[in-house]
Amino acid sequence: MTAENHTCCFVLVVDDDPDVCETLQTVLEVSGYRVAAAANGLEALKTLRSGLRPCLVLLDLMMPVMNGLEFRAEQRSDPAIAAVPVVVVSGDHHVAEKATEMGLEGLAKPIDIDDLLHLVARFCGPPSGMA
């Protein structure tokens, strides 16, 4: 990836379910956003520490290797990436409570596409070509 990775419309999807990643990526890309995916928190940290700065991280909580809570703790402890916005996306029916406990907003799975797009637009602005 190039220096373009610092644009306002890049979203990082972090989820161990390939179907969820693919669906979110497709919806966001069709809507005009650029998307990268990570299968767990450790991959997401590597992506952020490589210099990529998404306007938003959509974070699942339950993942192998490094879960969402562990990712968030690591992210918050690293000044270089601590300010990157994160929204919890989880199938846990207590997603709002868990997100609030983490100081974040949350979206419950199954995700309402309109809610997703409104949330992403709030953090990232209008997608490329739609400003």
Image (cartoon, grey):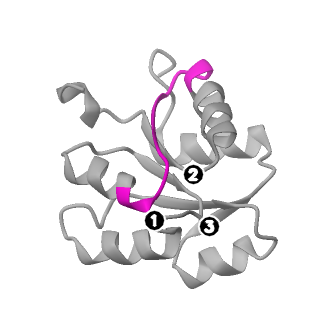
Mark 1 vs mark 3, foreground winner is 1
Give neighbour class at mark 3: few <14, some 14-19, many 20+ (Cα, 10 Å): some
Q: Residue at x 58, y 31 (%)?
A: 25
Q: Name which residue type carries label 1.
A: Val
Question: Mark 3 or mark 2: which comes first in sequence?
Answer: 2
Residue 15 got which mark? 2
Classify mark 2: residues with Cα within 10 Å, few (<14), some (14-19) or many (20+). many
* Residue picked out by circle 3: 62
Q: Secondary structure at mark 1?
A: loop
Tag shown at residue 123? none
* Residue type for callout 3: Met
Relative placement, left or right, of 118 versus 35 is right
Tell me residue 12's x, y (percent): 45, 44
Residue position marked by numbered label 1 in the rendering: 65
Q: How many marks?
A: 3
The mark nearer the N terminus, 1 or 2, is: 2
Residue name at image x 27 percent, y 32 percent: 5
Looking at the rendering, the stretch of residues picked out in magenta corresponds to: 29-42
**How far apart in space, not on screen, are marks 1 and 3 (Cα)?**
10 Å
- Which element type, helix, strand or loop, lies under badge 2? loop
Label 1: how many residues lie within 10 Å, few (<14), some (14-19) or many (20+)?
A: few
Q: Amino acid at mark 2?
A: Asp
Q: Of residues 118 and 96, which is closer to you in this image?
A: 96
